[in-house]
């Protein structure tokens, strides 16, 4: 080896010039939030400790563009660089900072760039925006607006009060983006606060605020817990009830759940504490009698936890905190020591008994030491509250007393003025007695107020004896409150409530005309009438519940609007004296308007009218003798405009009119506003309408005169809108004239009335006008049925019963009580049938005879014979029956025609209703014409083919009168159907087709005489030529003939729109009859990719239709259909829906009930999807049935009557077409409980599993999560009420405090019946549009909400949470058709509905092929096995394969080239399922690992089919996309492959005949395609596949990659490779897609000319995909697969076992184990699909993971286990579930759990020797034979054989010992199928022993003794 010149070279490798890890980056420009578009920002880079180097900055915008954000980098001092930039793009930016080409710490920095003004980031706080708690005249309605993160803008706020008025709110700028707003509400009702920022409404605006009435209560609250606090420190406050009784309540709203503790001190005070677990804004509601007290809710700001502040270490002492005898106005002092509590503000407050604050002096004396002093001003209880850092100290509050020298409890109040029975306007009084209390500083003080807080005048008189008399008069009924104070203190008896009753009984007063009309989004009101005015309305509560179950308070209700300048009238009932009634209307401007009152004649009703002249809310106050009548004052809103719905039209002229007479009606427009009145009339004639002048009371009179009868439409509009009821449909009739009534029909004909036959007749009164009609038939027990036809006629039917022949009937018909003309009618009932009355005539029975070969006819008259079945039978001279055609000529006459083909005597028999009309009539057929002149010119065949139609031509020129007849008989005597047609050239064509092979005889005649050469024989065979099959795809010749009595017995079969491949080929059809014979139906090409099949059956029973394309069954074939006789007496069903149908389209069939009615019918359909059944009774003895199937496959249709199947039921229908596309979303709401006791934070939740045990015994897994306070939260879905037991275990053992009990209320249990679903999206839809509906579960409890939509396209489903806790759900279909929407809640069905979607489709094309897959021969142990596949662009040297046996032994397998692909060969040594792993560059190829069963298959089906290949991942326009399908494990079945997308696909299919096939498809247009693979009409796992087909790569073809990472790529570690453009022009783009689907941009930098370095940093273990594109087109090979993580992350090494994948029972917990010991760390996903959603969890164990799950419905569940995105061996597992249905079954529900696994080590990992597999064998079944076991010869090869074929799998041991030790040599050779040949050599004479063990057991005869 020689050096090149100058070799070796010296290279100096220097140390790095700088260290990127020492770089510091800081500043606003790298903060996650706060950056505004268009506004320049910056950040600094400190290189002080990093060494030499220059920083570099690259900023990527949200689209990954690095050019859109320019960067300015400059050095501001020696060690600091400043980067300035601004972005105009909103979204998440990536700020990449490099130093010496390496990322600095924290890089890339995520920076969110917000708009200049982003209202969504504005936040609000404060009680002024709370939905409840605010009251009238509340002075504390304050709120704050926080705009710190919202950019630049101006906040605005306005308040809309009840009635629509607007109150502007002044906002005070507090600095730093914070604004304060205040308002004082003055009205009761709902206020709306609208807050905007930069001209746009902020998030959650508008705010709904319910303002309540002003409330007076003595309950007060104070303390630091109502102002602020700190996380994880108790927040405390005091509540003083001041003597008031009633229930107290506390509610805390905030960012975290807080527990509330209340300590009652027993002196009408209590201390409340709550523990906040998260910082933020809290609202504390303090409720007295369920109403917020003053200032409630309290706004509390909770600060984050400060570890250096310890309020519990503050010490307080001194007399001011302990004394119970404080002196008024004297200092009370105490000390506070906080030197150990950290640095925080100290706050001290003192509150006296009345809630007044007492000033406190705080003097700081030193470090943490304070001296506090206060002077009590009032006697009584004082509370001293000390807080530090906003948190109460440990003993705060302190309770001290300032004694009261007087005994206030001795003061008493008595008298009628404080007792019951008070009346309004009647003076009353009471006395205050202070004689026993001592003398105060001042006398007494008192106040009297009504329930609105208004003061009532009173008079107090000092009686001079320490008593006081008080007089007052209550002006109105209601509740009044009296407070009495003595010496400034309220006496114990105060406050006193008194109820004042009305001095008049107005309970019978009712107001009409101001009734509410409820309009959405408008305020409404209603009225309650009391049975007695002595009832107290204030003691009753009213709640209005909306359809969404939301409660609405009474203040939200208001009356309907009235209109400006429109007279408005209402009336008051029950008034005796109109003079005492006063009505005052108060306008919005405050102007009062008197209303006009008028009284009716009896004086009980007063009408009140007024005309409003001003817009806005008016108050109508109605007083009677000074008292408000019930409901007064009434609120009405006056607006401009009109309301046509208030216009009333009435009168006889709108109900019914008389022709040629004036007809009148009235129109009332009172209260409807001012607008134009329009009148129109349309009908059979012109009718002039006349409107009388306005009566000035809002009414007018309309008159019109029609000139023709009929229905007229009278339209009345007001303001161009129809009034209620318009247009009115008015029938115009004749005036009543009974002489114009007529009756006619068979039911009145004495010759037609027969027993057992329903009789009908008609009564025509169309020209007589409307009047009562009656019908009576004497002589019948049952009355006749009279049906009004609504056109002036009546249909009458009656049934003379069987046995009533000879009965006299009298029919009485009356119109308006008078006999109509020609009535009564007298009738006599005749027998049902009179065969002797049948009359025969015609040439067919002429005594002169008939001419042979010419049709002969017979006329049969049954007019006078009654109703019966007609039968005609003609027997020829040879004894054979001839075909007879019967034609109904109406009126009871029939024409029967037959063809006498032979000469001789014929016998004609005619029967009627089973009775022979007369004796057989003999008729002679005479010859005619010259048969000797006829010749067969062509078609005289000697050999024909079965199923082929043939034609023979007979020339009959000059043969005279006659016709050709032909009979073809088989060797068995059966006749062949023959058709003879006469041509225009005196020739005849004879058509025939034989159906079976054999010998046939032909006999042709003319005029009854044989034709020359017309008698001959031919032979038929069953071979079918290709041309014959091809002709069966074309429309066959049809001849229109009259049906015979034989043909009429069966309904013809017609199957329309059967889809067939459109790629060109041979289509054949055959019908297999119940007898086994085959017939050819007619095929018609519909020219749209479908064909129609027509077939005329002639046998009762189940028929089979075989439809094949190129020899393969088309989808759905074979079809089965049942043929029944039309005349059968049993119920029958017929129609295409019983045979076949198309997915997503209605399938129809008809059931003939034979007069039994539809009531007893029952229908059920079982198949691959749920099919909704719609039945319609046609009222004619038939029932129409329709159903829609959503998945292809075989469906069983059961039709029962009286719980018994009808004939042919159950029917089998084949549904074809593509399976419906389905999309599903699930939204859950769970109940959550906290685990009692503490759980250490170091305990991994993955090692815990929780279960909840319901009272019914149902046990389900729960979800665990870590709460902020460190404890465990347990989430579950409650399914029943009662006591539940919750268990939390670790490794099967309960942890501390487990199990524990919880109580589930009934209201928490999910109830699907309470789910409310509304919206137009449930009734119809449009393509490419959002179709929306709303789901409200507010009152339905906890439960998961699951929605699925399936139809012709996969709908994009979106949902949005609404403020009222409901969901707005929208779906966007892309194809028109029928969609099925299924909605479940808490696993119970809410609705299942079919929605028809209309509109334009997406113009997608679909191509499909289908092949029948045969079962692969069973593979045995020892035979060679092969698994084949194709991978274009890969050589066998790049592939590796291994096989793992069922016992766990893994061996390498050979890969060799086979035809069109590669094959993996191996020889199995045991029975069972083997795992075959095939890898390319250490990565599993698509589809690997494979399952390969040796021996009989365990189970088959679509879940055992696997597919893989590049054609299921990506594609290129115009280039074949290829993939493999393996069906070996699925067994025999039908494989269908479809490709759907923007263009039609050309699909190529190659069957390898070994259980695998190769598929290729080519498309012409780029875009997204959908590849569906179905087996036996079920989708295989992971189907359908979404494939993006890119356009022609163009320039991208030139690009290649280099230095691609081949070694280990780890998470969170950068990796790099090169991309070479090779003169390609365009923009490079790269991104990394992780196994979970997350996308991450790659960093691309220029390496040198046309070379680029691509750097990426994976975040997840598993197979990641690198997408490299040039000009948005994939380069060759993209996406590239990258294995991230440890080398041993292999899905083939995972094993799954347990009862949970074998067989389960509904409602019972089950589990299975996933062994991951040998698979390494990776991404593990478990999905369970089935008829219900399941509760499941995954627990980490020492050597793997255990999955628990509980099924709730019976059926099959499919458990899929994937590792690193690949199915593990055996997945998916098909699991049958039995038991009871605990929830409603659905088509498919999915439940998934995902785990990032860690490395696991088996418990026996430290053992040096490998563990042997577990063998199953029986040594007793091993046999051995051969001379070598009997005698041995020295120095020669001795031999024997061992057969272990029946002994199972194990290791064979053979040992041999001689007289001097082991034998010289011994060989064992496996010859196949567990047969072994043993050879040995002996050198010494003597006795030898041969031991043969199979495993550890000796075989029979071992050891063997041999003499050598």
Image: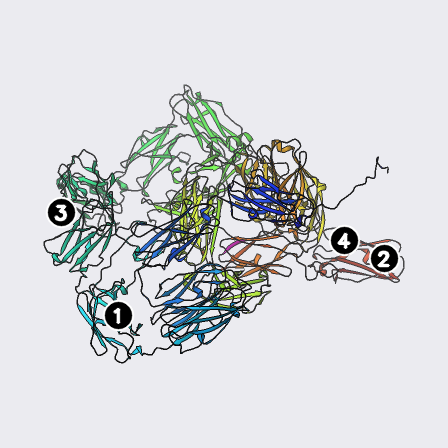
Comparing labels 4 and 2, the label whose residue is closer to the camera? 4
Q: Is 1559 contained in the magenta span?
A: no
The figure's colour scheme reads rainbow
- For disc 1, the marked residue is 446
Report whether residue 1413 is seen. no
Separation of residues labelled 3 and 2 (CA atoms): 129 Å
Q: Secondary structure at mark 1?
A: strand
- For disc 3, the marked residue is 817
Q: Secondary structure at mark 3?
A: loop
Could you tell me if the residues under marks 4 and 2 are in contact, i.e. CB atoms within 8 Å? no
Where is residue 1319? Give x, y as percent: 38, 47
- For disc 2, the marked residue is 1832
- Residue 713 appears in which quarter of the rendering? top left
> Residue 1538: which disc?
none
The span picked out in magenta is 1752-1759
Where is residue 1421? Give x, y as percent: 69, 51
Residue 67 left/right relative to 557: right
Disc with the residue nearer the chain's start (3 vs 2): 3
């Amino acid at each position: 080896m020689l050096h090149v010149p100058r070799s070796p070279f010296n290279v100096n490798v220097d140390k790095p010039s700088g260290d990127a890890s020492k770089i510091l980056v800081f500043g606003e420009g790298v903060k996650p939030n706060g950056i505004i578009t268009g506004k320049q920002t910056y950040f600094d880079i400190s290189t002080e400790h990093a060494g030499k180097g220059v920083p570099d900055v690259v900023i990527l915008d949200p689209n990954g563009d690095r050019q859109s954000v320019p960067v300015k980098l400059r050095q501001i001092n020696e060690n600091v660089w400043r980067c300035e930039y601004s972005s105009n793009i909103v979204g998440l930016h990536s700020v990449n900072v490099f130093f010496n080409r390496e990322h600095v710490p924290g890089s890339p920095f995520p920076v969110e760039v917000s708009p200049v003004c982003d209202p969504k980031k504005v936040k609000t706080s404060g009680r002024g925006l709370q939905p409840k708690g605010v009251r009238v005249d509340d002075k504390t309605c304050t709120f704050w607006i926080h705009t710190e993160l919202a950019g630049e803008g101006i906040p605005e706020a306005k308040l809309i009060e009840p009635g629509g008025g607007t109150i502007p709110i002044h906002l005070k700028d507090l600095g730093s983006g914070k604004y304060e707003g205040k308002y004082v509400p003055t009205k009761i009702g709902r206020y709306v606060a609208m807050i905007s920022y930069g001209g746009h409404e902020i998030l959650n605006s508008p705010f709904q605020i319910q303002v309540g009435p002003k409330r007076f209560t003595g309950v007060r609250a104070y303390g630091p817990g109502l102002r602020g606090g700190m996380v994880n420190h108790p927040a405390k406050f005091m509540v003083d009830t001041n003597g008031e009784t009633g229930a107290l309540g506390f509610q805390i709203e905030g960012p975290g759940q807080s527990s509330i503790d209340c300590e009652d001190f027993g002196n009408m005070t209590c201390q409340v504490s709550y523990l906040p677990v998260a910082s933020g804004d809290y609202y504390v509601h303090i409720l007295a009698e369920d109403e917020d007290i003053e200032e409630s809710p309290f706004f509390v700001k909770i600060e984050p936890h400060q570890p250096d502040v310890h309020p519990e270490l503050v010490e307080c002492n001194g007399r001011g905190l302990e004394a119970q005898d404080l002196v008024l106005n004297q200092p009370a002092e105490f000390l506070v020591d906080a030197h150990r509590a950290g640095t925080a503000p100290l706050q001290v407050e003192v509150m006296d008994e009345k809630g007044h604050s007492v000033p406190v002096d705080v003097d700081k004396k030193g470090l943490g030491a304070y001296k506090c002093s206060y002077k009590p001003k009032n006697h009584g209880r004082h509370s001293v509250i000390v807080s530090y850092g906003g948190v109460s100290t440990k003993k705060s509050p302190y309770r001290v007393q300032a004694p009261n020298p007087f005994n206030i409890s001795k003061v008493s109040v008595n008298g009628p003025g404080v007792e019951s029975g008070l009346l309004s306007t009647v003076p009353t009084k009471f006395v205050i007695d202070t004689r026993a209390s001592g003398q105060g500083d001042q006398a007494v003080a008192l106040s009297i107020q009504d329930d609105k807080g208004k003061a009532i005048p009173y008079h107090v008189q000092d009686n001079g004896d320490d008593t006081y008399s008080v007089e007052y008069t209550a002006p109105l009924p209601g509740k009044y409150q009296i407070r009495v104070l003595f010496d400034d203190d309220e006496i114990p008896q105060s406050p006193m409530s008194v109820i004042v009753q009305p001095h008049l009984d107005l309970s019978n007063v009712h107001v009409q005309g101001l009734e509410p009309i409820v309009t959405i989004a408008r305020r409404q009101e209603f009225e309650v009438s009391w049975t007695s005015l002595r009832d107290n309305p204030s003691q009753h509560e009213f709640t209005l519940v909306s359809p969404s179950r939301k409660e609405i308070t009474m203040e939200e209700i208001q009356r309907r609007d009235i209109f400006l300048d429109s007279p408005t009238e209402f009336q008051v009932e029950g008034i005796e004296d109109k003079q005492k009634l006063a009505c005052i209307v108060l306008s919005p401007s405050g102007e009062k308007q008197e209303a006009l009152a008028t009284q009716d004649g009896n004086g009980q009703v007063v009408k009140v009218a007024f005309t409003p002249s001003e817009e806005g809310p008016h108050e109508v106050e109605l007083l009677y003798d000074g008292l408000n009548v019930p409901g007064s004052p009434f609120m009405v809103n006056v607006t401009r405009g009109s309301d046509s719905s208030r216009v009333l039209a009435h009168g006889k002229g709108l109900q019914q009119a008389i022709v040629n007479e004036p007809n009148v009606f009235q129109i009332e427009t009172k209260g409807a506003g001012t607008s134009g009145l329009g009148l129109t009339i349309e009908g059979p004639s012109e009718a002039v309408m006349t409107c009388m002048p306005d009566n000035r009371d809002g009414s007018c009179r309309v008159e019109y005169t029609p000139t023709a009868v009929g229905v007229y439409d009278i339209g009345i509009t007001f303001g161009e809108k129809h009034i209620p009821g318009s247009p009115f449909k008015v029938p115009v009739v004749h005036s009543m004239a009974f002489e114009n009534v007529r009756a006619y029909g068979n039911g009145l004909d004495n010759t037609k009335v027969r027993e057992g036959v329903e009789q009908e007749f008609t009564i025509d009164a169309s020209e007589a006008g409307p009047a009562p009609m009656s019908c009576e038939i004497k002589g019948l027990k049952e009355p006749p049925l009279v049906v009004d036809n609504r056109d002036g006629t009546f249909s009458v039917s009656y049934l003379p019963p069987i046995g009533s022949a000879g009965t006299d009937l009298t029919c009485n018909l009356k119109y308006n009580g008078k006999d109509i003309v020609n009535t009564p009618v007298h009738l006599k009932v005749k027998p049902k049938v009179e065969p002797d009355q049948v009359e025969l005539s015609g040439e067919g029975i002429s005594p002169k005879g008939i001419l042979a070969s010419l049709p002969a006819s017979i006329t049969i008259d049954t007019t006078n014979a009654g109703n019966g079945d007609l039968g005609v039978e003609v027997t020829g001279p040879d004894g054979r029956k001839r075909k007879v055609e019967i034609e109904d000529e109406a009126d009871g006459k029939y024409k029967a025609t037959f063809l006498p083909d032979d000469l001789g005597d014929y016998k004609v028999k005619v029967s009627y209703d089973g009775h022979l009309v007369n004796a057989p009539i003999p008729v002679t057929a005479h010859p005619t014409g010259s048969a000797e002149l006829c010749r067969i010119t062509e078609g005289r065949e000697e050999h024909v083919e079965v199923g082929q139609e043939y034609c023979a031509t007979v020339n009959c020129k000059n043969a005279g009168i006659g016709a050709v007849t032909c009979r073809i008989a088989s060797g068995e005597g059966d006749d062949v159907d023959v058709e003879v047609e006469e041509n225009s050239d005196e020739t005849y064509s004879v058509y025939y087709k034989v159906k079976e092979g054999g010998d046939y005889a032909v006999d042709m005649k003319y005029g009854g005489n044989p034709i020359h050469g017309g008698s001959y024989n031919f032979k038929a065979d069953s071979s079918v030529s290709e041309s014959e099959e091809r002709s069966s795809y074309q429309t066959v010749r049809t001849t229109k003939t009259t049906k015979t009595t034989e043909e009429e017995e069966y309904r013809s079969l017609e199957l329309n729109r059967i889809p067939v491949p459109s790629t060109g080929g041979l289509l054949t059809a055959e019908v297999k009859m119940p007898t086994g014979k085959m017939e050819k139906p007619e095929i018609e090409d519909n020219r749209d990719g479908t064909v129609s099949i027509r077939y005329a059956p002639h046998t009762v029973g189940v028929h089979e239709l075989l439809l094949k394309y190129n020899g393969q069954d088309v989808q759905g074939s074979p079809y089965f259909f049942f043929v029944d006789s039309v005349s059968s007496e049993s119920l029958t069903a017929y129609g295409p829906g019983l045979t076949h149908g198309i997915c997503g389209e209605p399938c129809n069939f008809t059931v003939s009930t034979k007069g039994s009615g539809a009531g007893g019918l029952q229908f059920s359909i079982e198949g691959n999807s749920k099919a909704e059944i719609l039945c319609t009774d046609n009222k004619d003895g038939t029932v129409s049935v329709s159903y829609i199937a959503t998945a292809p496959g075989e469906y069983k249709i059961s039709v029962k009557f009286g719980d018994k199947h009808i004939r042919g039921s159950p029917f089998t229908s084949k549904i074809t077409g593509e399976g419906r596309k389905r999309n599903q979303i699930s939204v859950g709401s769970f109940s959550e409980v906290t685990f009692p006791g503490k759980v250490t934070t170091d305990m991994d939740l993955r090692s815990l599993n929780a279960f909840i045990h319901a009272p019914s015994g149902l046990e389900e897994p729960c979800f665990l999560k870590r709460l902020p306070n460190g404890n465990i939260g347990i989430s579950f879905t409650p399914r029943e009420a009662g006591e539940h037991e919750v268990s939390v275990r670790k490794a099967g053992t309960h942890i501390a405090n487990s199990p524990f009990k919880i109580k589930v209320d009934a209201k928490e249990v999910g109830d699907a019946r309470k789910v409310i679903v509304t919206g137009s999206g449930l009734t119809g839809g449009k393509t490419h549009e959002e179709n929306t509906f709303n789901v409200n579960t507010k009152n339905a409890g906890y439960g998961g909400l699951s929605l699925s939509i399936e139809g012709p396209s996969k709908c994009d489903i979106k949902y949005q949470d609404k403020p009222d806790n409901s969901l707005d759900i929208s779906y966007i279909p892309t194809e028109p058709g029928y969609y099925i929407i299924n909605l479940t809640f808490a696993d119970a069905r809410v609705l299942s509905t079919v929605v028809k979607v209309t509109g334009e489709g997406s113009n997608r094309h679909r191509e499909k092929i289908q092949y029948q897959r045969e079962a692969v021969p069973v593979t045995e142990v020892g035979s060679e096995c092969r698994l084949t596949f194709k991978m274009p662009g890969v050589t066998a040297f790049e592939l590796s394969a291994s096989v793992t046996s069922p016992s766990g032994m893994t061996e390498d397998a050979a890969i060799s080239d086979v035809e069109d692909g590669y094959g993996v060969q191996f020889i199995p040594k045991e029975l069972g399922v083997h795992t075959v792993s095939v890898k390319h560059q250490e990565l599993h190829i698509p589809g690997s690992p494979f399952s390969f069963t040796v021996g009989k298959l365990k189970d088959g089906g679509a879940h055992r089919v696997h597919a893989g290949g590049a054609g299921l991942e990506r594609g290129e326009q115009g280039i074949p996309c290829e993939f493999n399908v393996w069906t070996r494990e699925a067994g025999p079945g039908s494989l269908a492959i479809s490709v759907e997308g923007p263009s039609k696909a050309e699909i190529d299919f190659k069957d390898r005949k070994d259980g695998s096939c190769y598929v290729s498809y080519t498309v012409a247009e780029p875009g997204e395609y959908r590849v569906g693979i179905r087996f036996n009409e079920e989708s295989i796992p992971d189907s359908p596949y979404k494939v993006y087909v890119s356009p022609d790569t163009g320039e991208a073809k030139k690009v290649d990659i280099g230095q691609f990472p081949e070694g280990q790529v780890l998470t969170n570690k950068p990796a790099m490779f090169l991309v070479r453009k090779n003169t390609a022009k365009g923009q490079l783009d790269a991104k990394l897609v992780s196994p979970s689907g997350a996308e991450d941009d790659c960093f691309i930098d220029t390496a040198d000319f046309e070379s680029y370095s691509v750097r990426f940093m994976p975040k997840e273990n598993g197979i990641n995909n690198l997408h490299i594109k040039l000009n948005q087109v994939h380069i060759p090979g993209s996406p590239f697969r990258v294995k991230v993580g440890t080398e041993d992350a292999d899905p083939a090494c995972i094993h799954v076992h347990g009862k949970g994948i074998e067989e389960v029972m509904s409602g019972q917990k089950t589990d299975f184990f996933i062994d991951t010991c040998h698979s390494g760390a990776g991404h593990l996903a478990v999905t369970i699909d089935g008829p219900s959603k399941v509760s499941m969890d995954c627990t980490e164990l020492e050597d793997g993971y255990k999955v628990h799950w509980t099924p709730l419905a019976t059926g099959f569940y499919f458990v899929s286990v994937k590792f690193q995105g690949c199915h593990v061996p055996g997945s998916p597992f098909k699991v049958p579930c039995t038991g009871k249905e605990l929830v409603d079954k659905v088509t498919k529900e999915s439940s998934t759990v995902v785990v990032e696994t860690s490395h696991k080590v088996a418990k026996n990992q430290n053992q040096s020797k490998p563990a042997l597999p577990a063998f199953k064998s029986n040594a007793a079944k091993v046999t051995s034979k051969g001379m070598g076991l009997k005698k041995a010869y020295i120095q020669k090869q001795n031999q024997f054989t061992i057969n272990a074929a029946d002994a199972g799998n194990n290791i064979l041991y053979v040992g041999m010992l001689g007289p001097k030790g082991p034998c010289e040599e011994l060989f064992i050779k496996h010859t196949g199928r567990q047969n072994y040949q043993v050879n040995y050599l002996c050198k010494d004479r003597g006795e030898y022993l041969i031991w043969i063990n199979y495993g550890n057991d000796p075989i029979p005869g071992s050891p063997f003794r041999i003499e050598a």
